[in-house]
Image: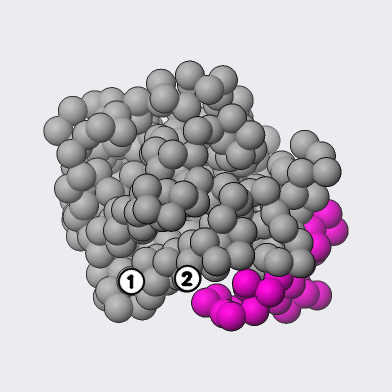
């Protein structure tokens, strides 16, 4: 049986990734800082571990995974602006330590790194392809790019097979932050739907289930020669359009109001060129309309609200 080690397995994306690999017949091992009784992933052989740790090398020797999917790390532009040191530790140093453990113990293990479209900053052209200039707007974006270069280094110099995936705007049930959660929380709470920006800002949303499917595909079919891939839907959606769709999904009678305030570190527009991952056979399966209906239902359950019919 093929085996995969998922770091950060108890996190938002880690859970989706673990379930998808298990459904596709992989033996799944996972590590995270969460107490085992709070993980609730029955298909995962779980070990509580705070990275970086020398214990990782010992476990790699024991389980000998064919693939390591690195979902661990910090994932907040805003927090990276406030505390760049912590973001560097969580998104650069941690990647180095995991890669170094693989180099020493399991050099043939494929390493899939979850990077971010934040490396692009404000792209000069849309859709943005992987060859576009790297112009981050935040420490988070710079640190993700530095971690990508570490992956390339370990492939070119040490022969560790790696690939980096630049995830655009990930969403799905289970994510208790970022714009979709914020909008749903305000709608379900019944208050004023006031949002930052102008509403004309745009994102390329990709459901976590599609990200997990793409990672399983790369685990088997990617060259893992240090290359990078965009992970997105290829569809540009303005925040105003998103807010209107969420109002409909929640069955509410409210209109969004935008305060015009910009958020430092965040780009204005995103739309991805996904032809590189498509060439390996990937196509997103979850439409935004279907995805946000599921998120709205989950948010209502989490917040003790009720969606109107």
Q: Indicate the colouring scheme.
A: one colour
Q: Quadrant of the C terminus?
A: top right
Tell me, yes or no, if residue 101 can be seen here: yes
Quick one: SS at disc 1? helix
Point out the residue furthest to the left here: 124
Mark 2 → mark 1, Cα distance in angstroms: 13 Å
Pinpoint residue 60: horizontal percent, then vertical percent.
68, 65
- Left/right placement of residue 134 relative to residue 223 reads left
Pinpoint residue 84: horizontal percent, then vertical percent.
28, 74
Point out the tag, 2 or 1, that comes first from the N-terminus: 1
On screen, residue 238 above or below 60: above
Residues 32 and 63: in front is: 63
Badge 2 vs badge 1, beta-carbon distance below 8 Å: no
Q: Residue at x 49, y 21 (%)?
A: 278
- The residue labelled by disc 2 is 97
Q: Quadrant of residue 88?
A: bottom left
- The residue labelled by disc 1 is 88
- Which range of residues does the magenta coloring cover? 32-59
Q: Residue at x 83, y 54 (%)?
A: 43
Pinpoint residue 202: horizontal percent, then vertical percent.
30, 36
Tell me, yes or no, if residue 12 can be seen here: no
Residues 267 and 139: in front is: 139
Q: Residue at x 21, y 52 (%)?
A: 136
Pinpoint residue 212: horizontal percent, then vertical percent.
61, 41
């Amino acid at each position: 049986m093929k085996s995969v080690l998922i770091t950060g397995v108890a996190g938002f994306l880690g859970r989706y990734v673990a379930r998808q690999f298990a459904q596709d017949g992989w033996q799944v091992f996972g590590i995270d800082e969460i107490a085992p009784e709070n993980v609730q992933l029955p298909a995962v052989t779980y070990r509580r571990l705070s990275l970086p740790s020398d214990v990782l090398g010992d476990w790699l020797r024991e389980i000998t995974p064919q693939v390591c999917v690195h979902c661990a790390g910090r994932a907040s532009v805003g927090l990276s602006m406030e505390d760049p040191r912590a973001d560097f530790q969580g998104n650069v140093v941690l990647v180095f330590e995991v890669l170094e453990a693989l180099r020493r113990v399991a050099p043939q293990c494929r390493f899939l790194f979850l990077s971010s479209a934040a490396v692009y900053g404000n792209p000069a052209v849309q859709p943005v392809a992987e060859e576009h200039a790297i112009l981050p707007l935040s420490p988070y974006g710079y640190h993700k790019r530095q971690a990508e270069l570490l992956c390339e280094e370990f492939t070119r110099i040490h022969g560790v097979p790696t690939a980096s995936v630049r995830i655009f705007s990930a969403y799905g049930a289970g994510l208790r932050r970022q714009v979709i959660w914020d909008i749903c929380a305000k709608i379900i709470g019944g208050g004023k739907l006031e949002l930052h920006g102008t509403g004309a800002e745009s994102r390329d949303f990709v459901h976590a289930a599609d990200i997990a499917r793409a990672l399983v595909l790369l685990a088997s079919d990617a060259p893992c020669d240090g290359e990078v891939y965009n992970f997105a839907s290829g569809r540009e959606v303005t925040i105003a359009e998103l807010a209107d769709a969420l109002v409909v999904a929640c069955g509410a009678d409210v209109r969004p109001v935008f305060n015009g305030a910009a958020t430092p570190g965040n780009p204005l527009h995103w739309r991805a060129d996904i032809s590189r991952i498509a060439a390996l056979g990937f196509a997103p399966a979850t439409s935004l309309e279907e995805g946000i209906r599921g998120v709205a239902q989950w948010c209502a359950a989490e917040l003790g609200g009720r969606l109107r019919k």
